[in-house]
Amino acid sequence: MADPTVSLCMIVKNEAAALPRCLGSVAGWVDEIVIVDTGSTDRTPEIAVGFGARVVHWAWRDDFAAARNESLRHATGDWILVLDADEALAEGCAPRLRELIRNPEAVAYLVKIVCPRQGDGGLVRLNWFPRLFRNLPGVAFEGVIHEQVIGSLAGRGRIDYSDIIVEHAGYTLAPAELSAKGERNLRLLERQLNDDPTYAPGWFQLAETYMLLGRVDEAIDAYRRALRLLEVSSLTLSPRVVALALQNLGAAHLARGDTEKGIDHLREALLLDPDLPPAHVHLGLAALRRDDPGEAEKHFARALEIADRLNREQDPGREYEISPWLIHYLRACALGQQGKTDAVRDGLLAALRLNPDHAESLWLLALACSALKEWPQALEALEALSRQGRDDLPYHLQRVQVLQALERHDEAAAAALRALERGAASREALTLAAQALCRDGRWSEAADAYEKLARLVPDNPLPLLALAHCREAMGDRPGAFAAYERAAAIAPDAPPVLFALGSSCLRAGQLDEAVACLEEAAARGPDRPEYLVNLTLAHLKRGDMTRAREVLAELSARGRDLPQAAELDRLLHRVESAIEESCP
């Protein structure tokens, strides 16, 4: 007995870019290709003929079912395979197709259509339609859009789930193309529902189209109409689709700001189908908006449990496939709001194992690892962001911090200068840049940064003190003293200013001025041991051993066990011994 034959039936218009992939996926595995062209102005017909197709030219009538039925009218195979130009059989599925059509009991097979969408965060919508069916008399499509053949197949034999996978690229278009497609579908759906307002699936499809176009209020109304019509509809929706409609209605209410209504519908959806990870994701997002990260974390964790189980079970007929990287990321966000930094890092690593290029996960991982002082991993995340083109001010500031912690000061300084290019008026950028340049010994560039910072915060003497330090390191004593004087003019009695000026005088050998400033700094800042250390040294250099001993005793009495104090004590002993030996 000869093997049954199969006809590929398609309708197309201006699909020159997509058609080769589609036809190439079935080349050599179908016996006939019938293509109804509804008015192409590109090379679509020529490409089809090149694959051996029989092209039928047919005037478009705003009716997908009519066009599909025209393709069936020209098919001669025992079985029909239906594909769109933006679809293709997954690798390895074509041989399986030939095996399935040998089954004498089946009249049709439900094919899994995988529909990734832009921005769906790892959640891929699945549709199960009878795209492989016997070419029987009376079999026909119904519906001007989202047309179905299942109604004419009912009662004519077994309709089984198959392991055939069709990859659909129709929702990964550019935004303008996707919007145009949505507007076309909207027009046809509205016409269909005007003719038959009791068609529940049409209202569901209309709601989905409204959401695609961002028309949330109209989507909510359409979802409600679909749900109200279920019992009297000519085509009852499955419980899973009802749950999906309730879930999407809840999500639409949340998008509009109707939080309580949204939560109620999401809970209804979970009563019908507890295995809806997106419902838990939406509930988690609602909890985050209510500043309840603990509740949000529970929902995200539950979504991860369900997704893991569903991915292991491979249940036929389910509505989703999930790569749960986005759920891991959202859970990490909820954990971060609770200060659980270790768990944040682990969650982000789980997200990145599934989606290594997710920029938000990489950025939060860099921040989390920095908080944990896990600097090499923080730098690795930043490097990955750099390869993606991240080049803004926060990125470079974080990079400066990480490189400084790793003591890669030359790279930190370079990153600091790039940060200044992107945010020269930023206080944080100037501060980090100046610090990094100092650590790399680039005193002149650091001085320029501190000068800019001083102008940005004119009432704060600290940038001027740092500027003075840079000038001293450059050997510019006049410039250093000018900076100290400017700091003293802002806060003449501030202990840090007095200490810095006194220390500078000490280094310059201006001992009387050093003692005066350091005595005042120590009196005003009694809890700063470094003030007393330098004051002791100033008295020692001036030869006032008695006062030096008094200050050092005061430092010891405060319980300051400092290495500098011990060194000063030893130095005093040597000086005192030398003085005694020099006396006759």
Image (cartoon, grey):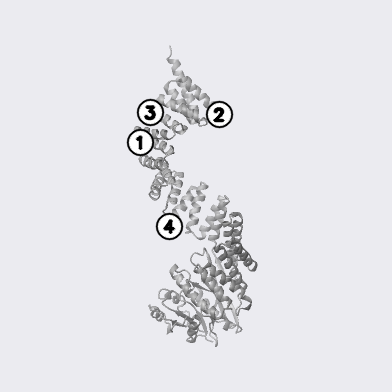
Work out whether mark 4 precedes mark 1 in sequence or the reverse, and give the earlier one: 4
Which of labels 4 and 1 is toward the front?
1
**Left or right relative to 309: residue 502:** left
x and y percentages locating residue 261 in the rendered image: 61, 64
Count of numbered marks: 4
Residue found at x 51% / y 65%: 120
Disc 4/disc 3 C-alpha distance (Å): 51 Å
- Going 50% across and 60% down the picture, which residue do you hit? 355
Secondary structure under badge 3?
Answer: helix
Distance between the alpha carbons at the discs numbered 2 and 1: 37 Å
Q: Which of disc 3 and disc 2 is earlier in sequence?
A: 3
Residue 323 position within the rendered picture, expressed as x and y whole percent measured from the top left: 54, 63
Residue that mark 2 sits on: 559
Residue linked to disc 1 = 474
In the image, what residue type sits under mark 3?
A: Ala
First in residue order: circle 4 vs circle 2: 4
Q: Earlier in the sequence, mark 2 or mark 1?
A: 1
Q: Which residue is mark 4?
A: 388
Rendering quarter of residue 511: top left
Q: Secondary structure at mark 1?
A: loop
Q: Residues within 10 Å of mark 2 (few under 14, many from 20)?
A: few
CA gap, disc 3 and disc 1: 14 Å
SS of the residue under disc 2: loop
